[in-house]
């Protein structure tokens, strides 16, 4: 009887192991499909999102399917890195544009100062001319420096 009991548990283990193997393969397929569904829904890809979509726990993915967990991390990492790189490029472009705009502003302010100086000189000359015309006074030309 002990021999038949020993044979019986061994036979029971083998079908259970075969069932678990099939179940693991099926679960792996379900996890792969869940990853696709999460992406297609436009949700943020994460281990917990894939687990929720597949109807399993995140711990199951971490502990039983570390390769799938690593695949998810790699996809998330690439996406995050790509976003970070895009933002860094936008920032560099914005800094370059700001530098160009500052240079343009500096040039415009220098031009404005020159124009303001010329304008004040012309106002002074106009005031002198108006005073001369109004009072019929003749002004002696100023000596020019050589």
Image (spheres, rainbow, N blue to C red):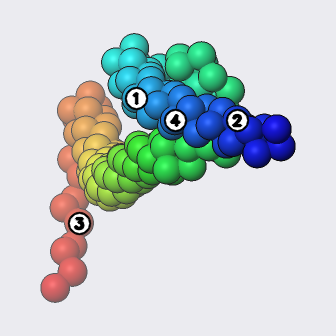
Q: Could you tell which of marks 4 and 1 lies nearer the N-terminus?
A: 4
Question: Cβ–Cβ below 8 Å for labels 4 and 3?
Answer: no
Residue on which the image places disc 4? 18
Local secondary structure at mark 4? helix
x then y, percent, for residue 2: 83, 43
Residue at 49% of width from left, 50% of height from top? Answer: 67
Q: Which residue is mark 1?
A: 29
Q: Quadrant of the C terminus?
A: bottom left
What residue do we see at 34% from left, 18% from top? Answer: 40
- For discs 4 and 2, the disc positioned in front in the rendered view: 2
If you read the primary sequence from the N terminus, does the residue marked by circle 2 or circle 3 appear first?
A: 2
| Quadrant of residue 140 within the rendered picture | bottom left
Q: Nearer the viewer, mark 1 or mark 2?
A: 2
Which residue is under mark 2? 8
Q: Secondary structure at mark 2?
A: helix
Check disc 4: other Cα within 10 Å, few if <14, some if 14-19, many if 20+: few
Front residue of 137/46: it is 46
- Residue 53 image offset from top left, x and y in percent: 53, 17
In the figure, is residue 24 to the left or right of 97? right
In space, the residues marked 4 and 3 are separated at their CA atoms by 113 Å
**Is the Cβ of the residue at disc 4 closer than 8 Å to that at disc 2?**
no
In the image, residue 5 sits, relative to residue 50, either above or below, namely below
Q: Residues within 10 Å of mark 2 (few under 14, many from 20)?
A: few
For this rendering, which residue is in front, 117 or 7? 7
- The residue at which mark 3 appears reads as 142
Q: Nearer the viewer, mark 1 or mark 3?
A: 1
Is residue 102 at least partly visible in the picture?
no
Q: Answer with mark 1 or mark 3, whichever residue precedes in sequence.
A: 1
> How many angstroms separate mark 4 from mark 2 (CA)?
16 Å
């Amino acid at each position: 009887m002990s021999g038949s009991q020993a044979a019986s548990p061994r036979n029971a283990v083998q079908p259970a192991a075969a069932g678990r193997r099939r179940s693991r393969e099926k679960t792996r397929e379900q996890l792969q499909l869940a990853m696709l569904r999460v992406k297609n829904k436009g949700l943020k890809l994460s281990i917990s999102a894939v687990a929720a979509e597949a109807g399993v726990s995140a711990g199951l993915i971490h502990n039983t399917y570390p390769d799938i967990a690593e695949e998810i991390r790699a996809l998330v990492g690439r996406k995050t890195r790509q976003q970070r790189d895009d933002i860094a490029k936008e920032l560099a472009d914005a800094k370059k544009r700001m530098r160009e705009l500052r240079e343009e502003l500096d040039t415009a302010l220098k031009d404005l100062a020159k124009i303001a100086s010329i304008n004040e000189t012309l106002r002074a000359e106009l005031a002198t001319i108006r005073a001369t015309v109004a009072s019929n006074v003749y002004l002696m030309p100023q000596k020019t420096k050589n």
